Image: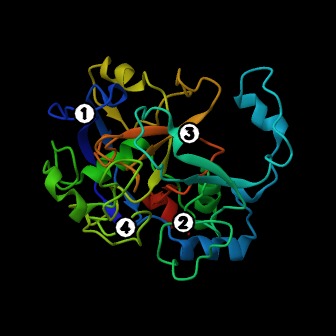
Amino acid sequence: MLWIPGGTFLQGAVPHDEIAMMHEKPQHSVSVDGFFMDITEVTNAQFSKFVEETGYITVAEREIDWEEMKKQLPQGTPKPHDTIMQPGSLMFKKTKTSVPNLYDFSQWWRWVIGVNWKHPSGVKSTLEGKENYPVTHISFEDAQAYCKWAGRRLPTEAEWEYAARGKKSNTMYFWGDDINILSKNANTWEGEFPVFNTFEDGYERAAPVKSYPPNSLGLYDMAGNVWEWTTDWYNINYYQELASTNTTTNNPKGAEKAYNPNNPYIQEKIIKGGSFLCSYSYCASYRISSRMGSSTDSSSEHIGFRTVATPDMLVKE
């Protein structure tokens, strides 16, 4: 872990970011106390140790509870057939032709039965040779369980963004504003999404941690590779509410409840950092201010996490 000194910064999209989404605006003043943060995303090796010591079973490995699932669906939604209601996770699949509507993500995501953190690339895949890759197919609940075991916690969105920005006060990316060196600094999608990837950065899917240069504070993979869980509820109005106070918010913990009109039945937490699927044409979420909501009970091959700790948490050890 690295010590991240406390300070004040402007959270949200910088003024010259022409592709920033509305939920990244407006900028607002935030201060955070100092904290320790993992230098890398939690790896398969680290998560394996947790499971070995605790016997923990991830959400993607458990039988699906229809009574719980239907709470997040419109009333009257019929129960899927039992052959479909099996443990699994979301996997990315390239399309064969160009996709005119990039808002319909069902075109490249598929539910794969039997896929989980131990079988991240398919039912027959293993972790052999991937011990130093970020653990994926991890739900929010799974990440929280790991944190409890490790004596850590997940970062707030403000802590994550503050750490990602590092010593860069007004840039779109952790390395500055030059998009031309993206492939040297992050694992993202180059080429036409989601049809083909040029492999300019060396990888099509997840890469081992520390495959790219760290940010100005020494943190790796704060852009691309895999998304990372934070503790904040995803609420599209939250930034506007903070900005309206015209004050600096100290250690914000996020909105009191989730609100996303596009997914009104789903409880979403904010994920940060983007992933190997982020492209300029799709979401460009390798930008520091990028944010997205993800259902707390879902998992996929492009979401992982890293942990943080405050000094008092370490003293308790």
The residue tagged 2 is 135
Q: Position of residue 124 (x, y in %)?
A: 67, 72
Q: CA distance from mark 2 to mark 3?
A: 23 Å
User: What residue would you read off at disc 4?
Assistant: 203
The answer to whether one can see residue 5 in this image is yes
Residue 257 lies in quadrant: top right
* Residue at x-position 25% and y-position 29%: 27
> What's the CA distance linking mark 1 and mark 2?
30 Å
Q: Position of residue 281 (x, y in %)?
A: 30, 40
**Residue corresponding to mark 1:** 19
Question: CA separation, marks 1 and 3?
Answer: 23 Å
Of the residues tagged 1 and 2, which is closer to the observer?
Answer: 1
Q: Residues within 10 Å of mark 1 (few under 14, many from 20)?
A: few
Depth order, front residue of 279/213: 279
Front: mark 1 or 4: 4
- In this view, the residue farthest toward the bottom is 129
Contact between marks 4 and 3 (CB within 8 A): the answer is no
Question: What's under tag 3, amino acid-wise?
Answer: Ser
In primary-sequence order, the first of circles 4 and 2 is 2
Find residue 152 and report its horizontal and vertical position in percent. 53, 60
Mark whose residue sits in front, 1 or 3: 3
Q: Residue furthest right?
A: 82
Q: CA distance from mark 1 to mark 4?
A: 25 Å
Q: Secondary structure at mark 2?
A: loop
Determine whether the residue tagged by mark 1 lies in a helix, strand or loop.
Answer: loop
Q: Nearer the viewer, mark 2 or mark 3?
A: 3
Q: Which residue is mark 3?
A: 106
Dot placed on the residue nearer the N-terminal end, 1 or 4 = 1
Q: Amino acid at mark 4?
A: Tyr
Q: Earlier in the sequence, mark 1 or mark 3?
A: 1
Q: Earlier in the sequence, mark 2 or mark 3?
A: 3
